[in-house]
Amino acid sequence: MIALTGATGLLGRFLLDGLPGPVITLGRRPVTGHAHRPWDLTGPAPDLTGVTTLIHAAFSHVPGRYRGGEGDDPDGFLNANLDGTRRLFDAAAKAGVHRVQFISSRAVFDGQPSGDPLTEDTQPNAASLYGQVKAQTEAHLAALPLIGQSLRATGVYGPGPTHKWQDLFADYLSGKPIPPRRGTEVHGADLAQACRLLLNSDQTGAFHISDILLDRHDLLTEVQTLTGCPHRPPPRSDRQVDALICTRLPALGWQPGGMGLLRADLPKMLEQ
């Protein structure tokens, strides 16, 4: 039986839709159609009786921010996301949970010098508190007597009640100036696909999850084509972005959707 934290979040909803059932949600609010056990990152560990796989996607942060998500309360941020996750993982080991998947981030490398290859063997080098929490949590999981799998994801996009580009699209369509930016992205459905594949693997450690290097110029040019918006997309960014090198998941058959999946889902995201 699979237990999932963060099922109502931006990432968790993709996992809940893409995982084989039954799935128990762990959190403050139940999800319609799924068994639920109450739990909060700042409280004691939940009841993990009967759970064979735990997938941890919950994260407490200032709305809309991951790096810098501590706001003006770094102690509270650490108490929830580092101490709370350690309690959760320790309880999983004690309860005999066979496998724990942790949704980590490429932010474990946000202190790495630009131009260095970011392979799955590269040691974390985090500058932000967010990246440090993710790296320390990975290390804690790796030391436990179970199958620990840390999925280092890039930016995750995809349709839903809310999505990461909602404000960006609204600003562009209303004619507000858009600063140039580029970054690595992966669709939430491809993140769920990675989790499914790893359910059948006893490999442990870090797995990189990244698909496309996307410039806002190209993204908003697609939006312009779909909407007929008269406003010019921003210029291309000159910022260097190091690719997150993915080798372990493709070797297991992982095949992300690339630009084709982005184009297919853009109309849904624009409707929202």
Image (spheres, grey):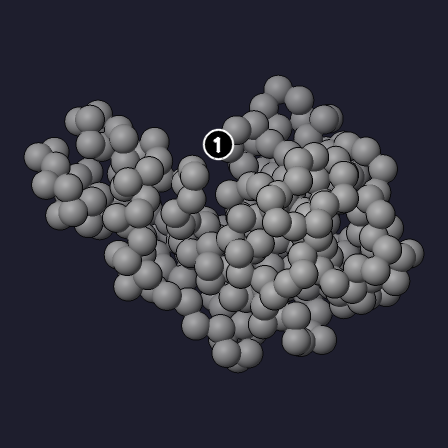
Q: Residue at x 48, y 66 (%)?
A: 245
**Whether residue 115 is visible:** no
Q: Is residue 120 left or right of residue 174?
A: right
Q: Residue at x 16, y 47 (%)?
A: 226
**Image x and y of residue 19, in percent:** 59, 62
Residue type, mark 1 in image = Gly
Considering the image in quadrants, where does the N terminus appear? bottom right
Q: Is residue 217 above or below residue 67?
A: below
For mark 1, what is the residue?
64
Mark 1 residue crowding within 10 angstroms, few (<14) / some (14–19) / many (20+): few
Question: Extreme front residue here?
Answer: 33
Q: Is residue 189 left or right of residue 26?
A: left
- In the depicted view, which residue is nearer to us: 53 or 254? 53
Q: Is residue 94 above or below residue 271?
A: below
Q: Residue at x 61, y 65 (%)?
A: 20
- In the depicted view, which residue is nearer to us: 167 or 154? 167
Considering the image in quadrants, where does the C terminus appear? top left
**Image x and y of residue 106, in percent:** 53, 52
**Whether residue 139 is visible:** yes
Question: Extreme top residue here?
Answer: 72
Question: Extreme right residue here?
Answer: 94
- In the depicted view, which residue is nearer to us: 19 or 74? 19
**Image x and y of residue 235, in percent:** 18, 41
Q: Residue at x 66, y 40 (%)?
A: 30
